[in-house]
Amino acid sequence: MTKKIFFTFLLLTTGYLVSFGLDTWIRINQLGYLPEGTKKAIVLSQAPIKINYFSIHDVLTDKEVARVNNITNFGAYENFRYVYILNFSSFKLPGAYYIKADVFYSPTIFIGNNIYDNSADMVLNYFRQQRCGENMAFNCICHSNDGFDGVSEIIKPTAIETEKNVFFNTFSSNFTAQTTSIQQQQVIFNHIDATGGWHTGAGFTKNGALAATSILNLLMAYQLNPNDFDDQYDFLGRKIKNGVPDILDEIKWGLKWLIKLNPGEDTLYHQVGDDRDMIPGLEPDKDVLNYGYGVGKGRHVFRATGKPQGLFYYQNQSNGLASLAGKYSAAFALGSEIYNELDPQFSDSLQMLAERLYKTGKKYPGVTQSVPGKINRFTEEDNWNDDMEVAATQLYRLTFSGKYLNDAVTYGRMEPVSPWVFVDSVNYYQWFPFTNMGHIALSTVETPGVRNEFLNDIKTNLQNVKQFMDKSPFLVNIPMFRNSNNYVVSLATQCHLYRRYTADSTFIDLETALTDWLFGCNPWGISMMVGWPENASYPTHPCCYQYINRNTLPIGALVNGPVKISEYLKEMTESPSEENSVFNSSNYFYSNSPTDYMTNAPTFDGSASLLFLLTTIQDEFNHRYTKNRNIINNGCITRTDSTKKFIQLIFIADQYNDGVRTINRMLKKNNIQASFFVTSDFIKTNKKTVSQWRKEENYVGPYADKHFATNNYKRPVKAQITHNEFFNDLKNNYAELEKIGINRTDATLLYPASRIDNDSISGWCKEIGIKTISQTPGTKSAQDISLPEMRDEYYSSGEIYNQIISFEKNYGLNGHLLMFHTGASAKRTDKFYKKLSTLVSELKSKGYEFVTLKQTTDNQTHNQTKSIKNKKGRN
């Protein structure tokens, strides 16, 4: 009998392990899903599987919360013989979950109203890292001698180096000799102050066209949703608040550099440096290159001539100025509109430049492409009418002159749809920008005929893409060109804005799928945005100097994205990495490798476009929900919106309950609610009290099971317990809450034991969809349990009361979390809870409202927020 049991167990265990050995993966959007949005996960398998249903489980308790059978058997796709689409859109409960399909588990799935919070601001981290000149992100100064307009003629010696993989080829001695030869034939015209701006490539070149396009995206993002951006940095990029949203600081940094590139009539500069700045190991602040003016003494600043350019064997195919002048003009025109009230003098100068450059564009139609250096790679832009269209549109918005609107319509009709949507291959940046911002701007003008015409053009773009999307389970079936993520962002942006401006949801599935792709619902299960989401799988070895030389990630950067393997092999000398071989196919290839500049290098303009997309999503969300304005320290909410006179009373309910009756009477007398964080032991001995708190609409959440300290207040950065100990304790705490009818989804806020915020605790809580909170410092409210023998750390009730009132007088208490306890040791005869009613009355007389944390930390609909205010108004 014993043998039979043993062999049965062995058989079951073997089958279980074999099941988990199958090559099967579940792909999700790792950023998360909106409760009311479309939610899909993709199962990829190389071995036979059959899925009839899947279950959704709470990530902390493992409890099954839903069972779903909305499944599509897609069949085979690329390398995968079995593919299923799991649709769980019907599940709307906020929280952290995982999917179990057969014996396979998904990564953690987050559902919530605030999943996009701070995502747009995150992209600005990358911009600060890319700053040229004074770079506070790396505390260095680079390229302070830029630069010289010094090329008197085109030099065309023999090709000297392979075109492939220049980022990782060292320069030969032949190249050095040739550089000297060129220098002997140059005539130095003059020095051009081209310091500032951003490095816009894998190396350290600066490109005016890419910068102007990026600035336009940032400007449009701010114009769309000005309240979405925080103020954490000053203009120089130092971690100092300056009263200006960070995005405006970054925009102004770029505009000031762009102004330098336009010193006079029809004189436009467009590039600083060339691909000589792509030497591996080169640091921007340790410039050892000689552009002909001496080592580190300055680089070429290329003037736009409207003719082919190139210092060495290769030349671009420039034939005009309109593409460049249009981009510059559009950025300056919208900049003038944005800064009209913020900085009128700056605004006027931008308008003058915008109008002058627009005339230059009309005078010199054609394109200005970037200048190649040692290798035959440059932006092969073919079109210019779209740039003049967006410039004319922005000038119309700025001046209300009908001539600009007429011009914009004329230019727009020259290219009604984006050419890249209808082709199978495309040259590098052939149709740039990837999104026609002129069409988007014209879709909002007051003239119905114009508005509808260009909305229909956008619709035509999307209809062409939509007819092919079902060929992929991910619904993303664009040709994998170089910089494919830029095309994904472009389509997602067009889908979103078309839906926004027309209320037509025809493309909602495509829009959602494109966004999901960017954040992990793709064959590789990787977010294409470096460092975001924080707990996600994202590029950890990007091809850029920050990582290669400084071991620092370019947080917030969008990487180029997958390409066809044939495209990859055209340029790369090295063999494809085996890391993702199971996910790569002939149609798409991606490698998380620091040597892979084709798929894994950050894209500067693509990152700006992503910021605009994220802003559009956040803005739509903010029309339905109020944005959180919480102050975060070490991942912990320590203060809510400082612009509102809300105070949150917080009570820790643990071993002492002698103040419960007094606290309850105070709440009832003042007709207010509070937030209670309870231990399991307190629940067991005070079930009726805790249930009554919840019944009276107070917030009740977890504090600890056995109240062992999660932190040491003398060393708050160091957690006192392990990851597993913390989760087990919290799980037990939730189990007690459930016994009195409080589910985990009702209590997603945790006050960590010992009251000290901590990166580890906050990070662990993010994994399971829980937010941590702590009291706002400065009022000494938490000292209501201090004892006389604590000497200097003892505060009498009078001292605490006076400290709170004094703090309010000097600094205000907007958004403050005032934390107290439901009782204190018998050794403390001076009980502060006896003063609470007086304190609340005095603060109410000063105009403060008392609300629960649930009301101020969760995103509320505008109607809900209004009802909170109305309710308080009746008090």
Image (cartoon, rainbow, N blue to C red):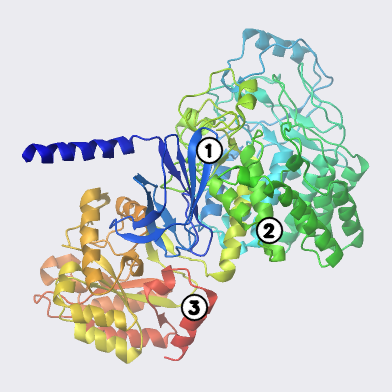
The residue sitting at 24% across, 84% down in the picture is 663
Q: Secondary structure at mark 2?
A: helix
Name the residue: 71% across, 25% down. 377
Decide: is 54 above or below 276: below
Element type at mark 1: strand
Residue at the spot of label 3: 864
Image quadrant holding the N terminus, namely top left
Q: Which residue is mark 1?
A: 76
Q: Amino acid at mark 3?
A: Gln
Disc 3 packing (10 Å; few <14; some 14–19; many ≥20): some
> Could one spot residue 563 in this view of the protein?
yes
Against 276, residue 340 (above or below) is below
Q: Which residue is mark 2?
A: 497
User: How far apart are labels 3 and 1 at the CA level?
Assistant: 46 Å
Mark 3 vs 2, N-terminal side: 2
- At horizontal 61% and vertical 29% (from top left) the residue drawn is 203
First along the sequence among labels 2 and 1: 1
- Residue 604, given in percent of the width and then of the height, sits at 62, 40
**Compared with residue 305, is residue 106 higher up or lower down, i.e. above or below?**
below
Count of residue discs:
3
Q: Is residue 361 left or right of residue 619?
A: right
Q: Quadrant of residue 779?
A: bottom left
- Callout 1, which amino acid? Ala
Q: CA distance from mark 3 to mark 2?
A: 27 Å
